[in-house]
Amino acid sequence: MRQIEFIAENEGVDPDFIINGVKNGTIVILNGGRPCGVGKGLRTKVNANIGTSPQRISIKEELKKLSQAIFSGADTIMDLSVGGNITKIRRMLMDDCNLPFGTVPIYQAAKSCGRPEKITLSAILETIEEQAEDGVNFMTIHAGITSNLLDIAEKRKMPVVSRGGSIIWAWMRKNKKENPLYENFDKVLKIAKKYDLCLSLGDSLRPGCLADATDEAQIGELINLGDLASIAREAGVSVMIEGPGHLPLHHIEANVKMAKKITHDAPLYLLGPLVTDIAPGYDHITSAIGGALASWAGADFICYVTPTEHLGLPKEDDVKLGVIAAKIAAHAGDIAKGIQRERQQDDKMAEARANLNWKEQGDIAIDPTKFWGTDGKEPCSMCGNYCVFKTVPPKKA
Amino acid sequence: MRQIEFIAENEGVDPDFIINGVKNGTIVILNGGRPCGVGKGLRTKVNANIGTSPQRISIKEELKKLSQAIFSGADTIMDLSVGGNITKIRRMLMDDCNLPFGTVPIYQAAKSCGRPEKITLSAILETIEEQAEDGVNFMTIHAGITSNLLDIAEKRKMPVVSRGGSIIWAWMRKNKKENPLYENFDKVLKIAKKYDLCLSLGDSLRPGCLADATDEAQIGELINLGDLASIAREAGVSVMIEGPGHLPLHHIEANVKMAKKITHDAPLYLLGPLVTDIAPGYDHITSAIGGALASWAGADFICYVTPTEHLGLPKEDDVKLGVIAAKIAAHAGDIAKGIQRERQQDDKMAEARANLNWKEQGDIAIDPTKFWGTDGKEPCSMCGNYCVFKTVPPKKA
């Protein structure tokens, strides 16, 4: 109950609003040192992915990325490590993290089994339980990709671009069997229930390029996710739905509305959407464009995309740019959604700006460091005496 | 005629389409070494502003910014210099510029007259003529702000944020007279006609914060701009309309559609729109979000906003980020608008990416420098053996 009150206070809503949302499945609570609510009627949240790759394994670097993500204002952290001692890395990161913490357990399971096609159901379930025991708050589970969708998805430009999804795909093809997480979803739910874990139903078949956006494979999986969400709710397990991916601007609203309808308004967690494929190095921007539109249309949770997406593992500076771009997108969407507390920030900034109050601008700015070192003195070198607020001073309120 | 053919070829449209657009006033041709068309049915164009401020006067720096803007893919350049010897700076920049070149002549006129309220009509007209004689291709003219709008705009959080607009405002207040450019628009048209100059009708009362978006002052001026556009067309002078500014996401489409309707589909040239006020240091991102939506809704021309907007004069690196963010926005909007030639780039990138062809990805990327130094070898350090295209290779087309 103290958690609910903390969240309600932070959001500026009544605790009953949160309680009802959780009951209806339109809101999930992500636990952690600083818990947050994700869902309908709440501020859009931002997640930062960190974690090692097989080529870049440095706990020190990951700890730096973690603290940068927290400092820059991420609401949650996910550890996507696939290189090194995954358990050890996760535990060290969790020790330093005061935010809700998420993982993708299939990575650790795949690593422990050697090759994707050698994964066993028990290895996956054991990994989920190990991570839940460690106190992980939410996990991506790739239960929605089913064997009937593979032939359809094979016709795409990019059959599968989800790392976890590709592992399940390879397993199903090799073993000629159904997705073990789909068939044994009840076992996953049992662990989730035991540890009060929130499941994030992964979209293995999210489009990896504009050409594959909103196609049969994607929507086929979404329908599965809707079914799984209903099953989870009945079992008393909270779920979010993960969404695309790469979508052209004019597909975004339709995708959000469709996902919300099919999943009975489950909280929607988007990676992107990236509105073009041709801007590697700037995918924090392509995804901020898509994320803003998606947030406005009803998405509840945005996973950041860093400038190094499609190029390499992000470094500390990339984490900062990714978090800030996603926060801008979330904020812009929240303004359009009508979340008053968010919009008030803009009005305060406008007043500080019109009054040439640089100290206050720095306090309100999404990145106060841009004002550091100015000693509250006028830092702007843009217009000098041609400053519009000197030529035509605004009336004081 | 060779110009029209060059533009039609570049756009992938029939020369008659351009000729008819110019006749109807829905397309303008911006002359210059590499002329471009701006308007309905054409690719969204990107302008980069450069120029000195009173505190930062370095021709060398401005020349670097110019070549960075050209290298990064700007379609046009505007010189907004207000510091130093403006005529000399402009001429040096024009010598190095192979793109359509624009200016805001009121700056030079204000500087030559000392203080805003001392400007004379003849000083403005002489400046316009001097710059036109120098070969400037398009100019922002602040003719739409009229005295009846000042009392309305004074109630805003930010009465006026256009630098040129604030000069005209101060002049009108001090001299208790109507805007000389509005009253003597025929004289401006005469010079424009003589030099085949395209007029960009400036929006002096563009909103400077979300709180002032889409208000009476802004729309009152837009109606004036629509009238002036009709007068210009009758006089055989080509015009664009400048637009906001700071707009929340959910105002953008309405603003674009309204501007198009009121100005009889004149090409629309936007600065932004910035979808939040709280992100100084990242306004290339806030404006990329707004610009993408605006382009999709029908805006034809986007003026870049750099990361230093609201903080200071941009440097060379800021120019690069500004151009690329605006190009991403324009491209994302063009895809949604259905401009096939733009979308084909994304499909080519998707194929190169699925085939792990790093050389080709670099060739297609909006910023090829992100792939430099990789020697065409695999530069991505994200997933290693967990690369989805290794786990599930796409079928070759």
Image (cartoon, coloured by chain):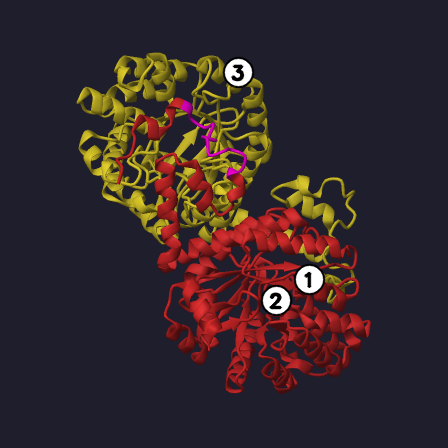
Chain colours: A red, B yellow
Q: Earlier in the sequence, mark 1 or mark 2?
A: 1
Residue B348 appears in the figure: no
> In the figure, residue B277 lies in which quadrant?
top left
Q: Chain of mark 3?
A: B
Residue type of the residue flagged with mark 3: Met
Residue B123 picture location, percent across and down: 31, 13
Report how far apart the C-alphas of labels 2 and 3 lie in the structure: 56 Å
Identify the mark at residue B92; answer none if there is no mark: 3
Q: Residue drawn 52% across and 24% down? A: B33
Residue identifier under label 2 = A101
Provide the secondary structure element on which disc 1 rests.
helix
Q: Is residue A52 above or below residue A308?
A: below
Q: Residue drawn 34% across and 51% down? A: B251
Q: Residue drawn 55% across and 64% down? A: A244
Q: Are marks 2 and 3 in contact (CB under 8 Å)?
A: no
Q: Chain of mark 1?
A: A
Q: Is residue A51 left or right of residue B98?
A: right
Front-most of A367 and B219?
A367
Provide the secondary structure element on which disc 3 rests.
helix
The stretch drawn in magenta includes residue A382 = yes
Identify the mark at residue A334; answer none if there is no mark: none
Q: Are marks 1 and 2 in contact (CB under 8 Å)?
A: yes
Q: Is residue A110 above or below residue B118?
A: below
The stretch of residues the image draws in magenta is A371-384
Residue identifier under label 1 = A93
Badge 3 crowding class, 10 Å Cα cut-off, few under 14, some 14 to 19, many 20 or more, is some
Residue type of the residue flagged with mark 2: Phe
Main SS, magenta region, reads loop
